Amino acid sequence: MSEWQPIDTAPLAGTMVDLWVVAVPRYNAYFEKYFTDGDDQRLTDCIFEDDQWKHWTEIGDHEYDPHHEPIGDCFKPTHWMPLPEPPQ
């Protein structure tokens, strides 16, 4: 199994990889407080296309229609790794 590598070494030519992302705190003026939309986590089957990182999802704007959706500004990719080899 490959080890995590810095995001600046990730392939940007449409190669599917796994990403490690960190939650980015965002300021909410109403509550006068910073919030995050989740925890630091691994996102599987990610791809760089249209000048942005996207992750595989089956929910969201296209419910029950699997697709790649932009990660958005609430998470920042910090590391990547190649997809593991399939079972023999």
Image (cartoon, helix red, strand yellow):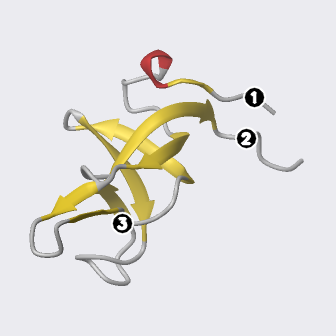
Left or right, residue 27 beside residue 69: left
Q: Classify 10 Å Cα crowding around label 2: few (below 14), some (14-19), many (20 and above).
A: few
Query: Which amino acid, mark 3?
Result: Asp
Q: Are marks 3 and 1 in contact (CB under 8 Å)?
A: no
| Quadrant where the image shows the N terminus | top right
Residue under numbered circle 2: 84
Can you give x and y, in whole percent of width and height, for residue 54 in the image?
34, 48
Q: Which mark is residue 18?
A: none
Q: Looking at the image, which is closer to me, 62 or 41?
A: 41
Q: Secondary structure at mark 1?
A: loop
Q: Are marks 1 and 2 in contact (CB under 8 Å)?
A: yes
- From mark 3 to mark 2, how far is it between C-alphas? 28 Å
Query: Which amino acid, mark 2?
Result: Pro
Residue under numbered circle 3: 37
Which residue is rendered at x = 42% and y = 74% of the image? Answer: 58
Which quarter of the figure has residue 62?
bottom left
Q: Mark 3 vs mark 2: which is more N-terminal? A: 3
- From mark 1 to mark 2, how far is it between C-alphas? 8 Å
- Circle 1 or circle 2, nearest the eye: 1
Which residue is rendered at x = 43% and y = 18% of the image? Answer: 8
- From mark 3 to mark 1, how far is it between C-alphas? 28 Å
Q: Secondary structure at mark 3?
A: loop
> From what the image shows, is residue 68 above or below residue 57?
above
Q: Looking at the image, which is closer to me, 27 or 56?
A: 27
Residue under numbered circle 1: 2
